[in-house]
Amino acid sequence: MPVFVSLLAASGALRVASLNLCTDEYLLLLARPSEIASISRLSRDPADSSLWRVARRYPANRGSLEGVIATRPTLVLTMGGGGRSSEAIARRMGLKTIDLPFPASIDDVERNMIRVASALGDAGRAARWRERLSRLKKSRRMAQDAIYLTDNGFSIASESTGAQWMGLAGFDQRPLPGGRATLEMLALHPPRVIIRSTYRQNQHSLGRAWLAHPLANNARSKTIWTDGRPWTCMGPLMLTEIERLRRKG
Amino acid sequence: MTSLQAFEVALDRRLQPTSLDVPPGQLVALVGPNGGGKTSLLRALARVEQAGGKVIIDGEDLDAAPEARRRRLLSFLPASRDVTWPIAARDVIALGLDKPDEERIAELIALFELDALADRPVDRLSTGERARVLTARALASRPQLLLLDEPLSNLDPYWVLRLVDIFRATADSGRTLLIALHDLTQLPRFDRALLIAGGRIQMDETPAELVAGERFGQVFRIREDAEGNWEIRQAADRQSSP
Amino acid sequence: MRLFLALAMLLCIAAHLLLPLAPLREAQAIDPELADLLLVQLRLPRTLLVIGYGAALGVSGAALQAIFANPLASPDISGASSGSALGAVIGGYWLGLTQPLALAVCGAAGALGTLALLVGLAGRRADTTTLLLAGLAISLAAGAATSLALALAPSPFAFYDAFDWLMGSFVDRSLSQAAAALIPAGIATALLLRRARALDLVGLGEDVAASLGLRPRQLSFEVIALSAIAVGACVSVAGAIGFVGLVAPLFGRRLSRGHPGSAMIPAALIGAILLALADLAVRAVPLDRPIPVGVITALFGTPLFIWMVVTLRRRLTA
């Protein structure tokens, strides 16, 4: 075996590299600083991650295994498959890999938290987070008719993880044909609440201009703003955001 | 009665500062070699380009005249017969008028024998036919001064004679015409001839005196032989001339 | 004939405003005021834009053809439409301007830039070949630059807007957007129409026009500037739409007996009708994906364009 691989095997200390914006969230929430080998570069961008300040303390990777080898990880986190070649390389080098599934529900998110915490050596690290989640679930209220509205009227599926999180906050995402709200629909059947995202708010696009149309800003719906960054992954960071939305609703 | 007075009109290198005085009712021919300045003089007088100096028609300063007045004062006909748009002959003639005047248009159509062609688009006429239409346009507004650049080129003998008849009649009615010519056979019918070469008026005489003048032969590099026929001046001849 | 055109336009306006009828009926059933709301906030801006943009294309196409003395000049072939798109894209995506009026200014600036480039490259009285080549080159370059500007823009969603910018769209535009486009375009178009007689006279040749007291060079610059404003403002809201500015003046001249300046008014009506019909076709096709209006105008415009080139060739060689 090549020298550096045997060195790796000999080191013993746990070092984790995360190749994906969404797996970054778990790592940053659960790991100690010395345990983090590398974070994906997307997490350093204030436009994409609410943990960007913390993420900047660590080396950045571009999402490939080759890029993180220099940081000497012992465990690699991926989501949605790191690619077959990556798995093969990792096995050759004796690295452990954990591939987290895209969460299809809040339960999936919870399971991912437990799994990552266990991989870090202590499932109890996820306890606080799970406690907050359980409190939210117990105090669930009557949900209002709501639409999560993004560029060009696109929304989220009413069975998606995002919709489940919304439900926890007290908002019932309306099922929409084609996953999209039209201006006619917003005028004729306005929802009680419209949730708007601040994601990349200052960046113009035609879809963004659509949201400025008078019919998309009906006074009959209450508009609530949310930090759009956690919604990309619908992962553990959503908890804080949902707690905040609860108070707004 | 139109008189033309031009003071110091010039066009960079193509026309030296030139002054001209034409009494009313004169039919003036401009002759000269290619590139000598005939077209430049007409363009300068017509204010097609910024030409400095002054042009006074019947005591009225052309540059100070309002746009509406220009049509009455002068008309310019360039040498080019190109047309861009497929407009009917009668409509081209109508462009020469301020307001629609069916009588006048009919009069001109008859005068230039365009009856059969009146509704045909000008781009489908022959060069000669187009020349008649464009000349009719220039005459339409009965301007006091007519500046015509080679209106007789490419016309058959009938129309060369007819057009000169029309020009003669126009002059006789008291209006003034300056006409650039290449073909000198019609020269005798003009009242006055200017020889323009090198951007200057070299001679200003009656047609007969002009042709007989020494300068005329020098400029065109031709001379009359004993029988009164024209021939090319030989280099040797030129050397041996006094 | 003009009466027929005016009636046809009224019919198009009515159809464009009211079809499809179903959502309006649905609104009426819930609350009559809602039907009005839909008509005013959703249908009216779209119809106003379609009519105004079509008219602006017709008028500026006719005016450009008059001063370039060429029946093939037009906002799209001269690059003005693509230039407008580039200007608006840079203003919106790179300079971060959001006010529709500011974007209209950027669109006009873009059009002015490309037209100035065309005059610089081909000259004002260029022959057909030179004009076409220069215009097409500039148009392609501006189109490519627009795509690049969108691809590199800060927003990752910008690139998907390329289709709308380069092929046009009237979907879900607001009244303020319509006003930002049509007020400048309307003023510029009105000023262009006032020059109809002068443009007719320029049709006799610049020399004759100059001798009649007109100033052809100044007139050219005025026409270029006004066309840039009219087209630029419309493109900034609805994207670049081709062929209407080429084809409407062609038919306009049929109605004005060939005079290039007097063709502007009929060209305006015809342009408006063509664009309204194209947009109606877009809305009538029952796909979830919207077809850009520019595709429809290209469908009817391309065969006409080819026919124009063929007749031009025949005329030149005759």
Image (cartoon, coloured by chain):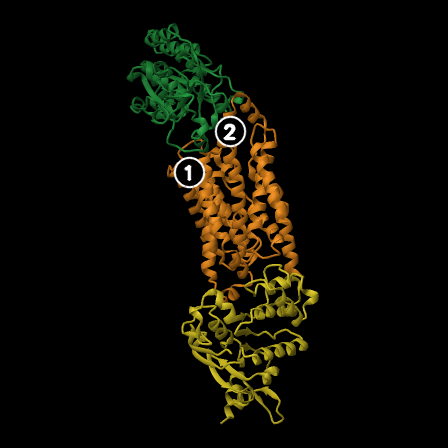
Chain colours: A green, B yellow, C orange
Q: Which residue is mark 2?
A: C36
Q: Position of residue B213 (x, y in %)?
A: 52, 89
Q: Position of residue A126 (x, y in %)?
A: 34, 9
Q: Secondary structure at mark 1?
A: helix
Camera sees residue C83: no
Q: Nearer the viewer, residue B121 or B114?
A: B114
Q: Height in image: C47 above or below B168?
A: above
The disc at residue A26 is none
> How many angstroms separate mark 2 from mark 1 (CA)?
24 Å
Subunit of label 2? C
* Kind of residue sitting beneath label 2: Asp
Q: Position of residue B81 (x, y in %)?
A: 59, 67
N-term mark: 2 or 1: 2
Q: Position of residue A67 (x, y in %)?
A: 38, 26
Q: Height in image: C86 above or below A229?
A: below
Q: Secondary structure at mark 2?
A: helix
Q: Height in image: B207 above or below B42?
A: below
Tag count = 2
Q: Quadrant of residue B119?
A: bottom right
Q: Nearer the viewer, residue A4 or A221?
A: A221
Q: Quadrant of the C terminus of chain C?
A: bottom right
* Kind of residue sitting beneath label 1: Pro
Q: Nearer the viewer, residue A112 or B220?
A: B220
Q: Which residue is mark 1?
A: C100
Looking at the image, is mark 2 or mark 1 nearer the viewer? 2
Q: Which residue appears at 47% of the width and 65% of the height?
A: B67
| Residue density around tag 2, few if under 14, some if 14–19, many if 20 or more, within 10 Å | some
Camera sees residue B185: yes
Subunit of label 1? C
Q: Which residue appears at 61% of the width and 78% of the height?
A: B164
